[in-house]
Amino acid sequence: MTDPRFLLAGLGNPGRDYCLTRHNIGFFFIDYLAGRHGWQAETLKMQGLTCQGRAFGAQIFLVKPQTYMNRSGECVRSYLDYFKIPREHLLVLHDDIDLPAGRIKLVGRGGAGGHNGVRSIIQHLGTQDFVRMKIGIGRPPAPPEAGGQPVDRFVLSRMGEDELALFDQRKALVEEAVALFVREGVDACMNRVNGR
């Protein structure tokens, strides 16, 4: 019997200019998960940087779409189809401005919530029924009318040292969530991760 296959897709924008920006937090955690297993998501295939290997009792495919955020669905759909991975085994990791920075929340379905990468995946899969790991990045400290950054500039800005330290602290929880999702399913994952 072959191991079940899972696709973990971290969302972000390609290129050095976007490295360690808030909108690329999905890439940040894909790179972390790859490194934990001695892998590197550096092979370009089907518009995504990818690697694969066995972990958590399954065959794991990691991908960072290189299509820019608003076309992420093209890459994700290609991987699911080519590697015959069931949609129930897809986990999309992405930033969420409506969650406090560092908060991790798993959901089994839902709309795009204003996130262009998630919207593209919904469009290309033809359904909202896929699991997401929402990674809170918070909102700008002050609204634009009070001199703060507009949201679009905020999400595309590089994270500060305090934020990077916070997300470093969340790496273990993200890995635990992935392990739970793969081994026990989304419900167990939501029950034990959300709210921590």
Image (spheres, rainbow, N blue to C red):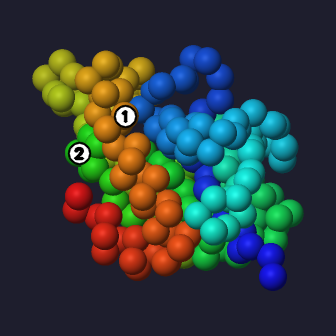
**Quadrant housing residue 88:** bottom right
The residue under the point 74% across, 45% down is 51
Camera sees residue 70: no
Residue 30 lies, with reference to residue 108, above or below; the image says: above
Which sits in the foreground, 112 or 32? 32
In the rendered image, the quadrant that contains the C terminus is bottom left
Question: Residue 75: where, in percent of width, then height?
Answer: 74, 51
Of circles 1 and 2, the one toward us is 1
Relative horizontal placement of residue 29, taking residue 81 as reference (left or right): left
Query: Dot 1, how many residues are within 10 Å of its Cα: few (below 14), some (14-19), or many (20+)?
Result: some
Residue 169 lies, with reference to residue 96, above or below; the image says: above
Q: Which residue is mark 1?
A: 168
Relative horizontal placement of residue 32, taking residue 126 as reference (left or right): left
Question: Residue 65: where, in percent of width, then height?
Answer: 68, 43
**Identity, as a three-letter code, of the amino acid under mark 2:** Pro
Question: Residue 137: where, in percent of width, then height?
Answer: 32, 39
Query: Dot 2, how many residues are within 10 Å of its Cα: few (below 14), some (14-19), or many (20+)?
Result: few
**Quadrant housing residue 171:** top left
In the rendered image, the quadrant that contains the N terminus is bottom right
The residue under the point 39% across, 77% down is 188
Q: Which residue is mark 2?
A: 100
Q: Secondary structure at mark 2?
A: loop
**Identity, as a three-letter code, of the amino acid under mark 1:** Asp
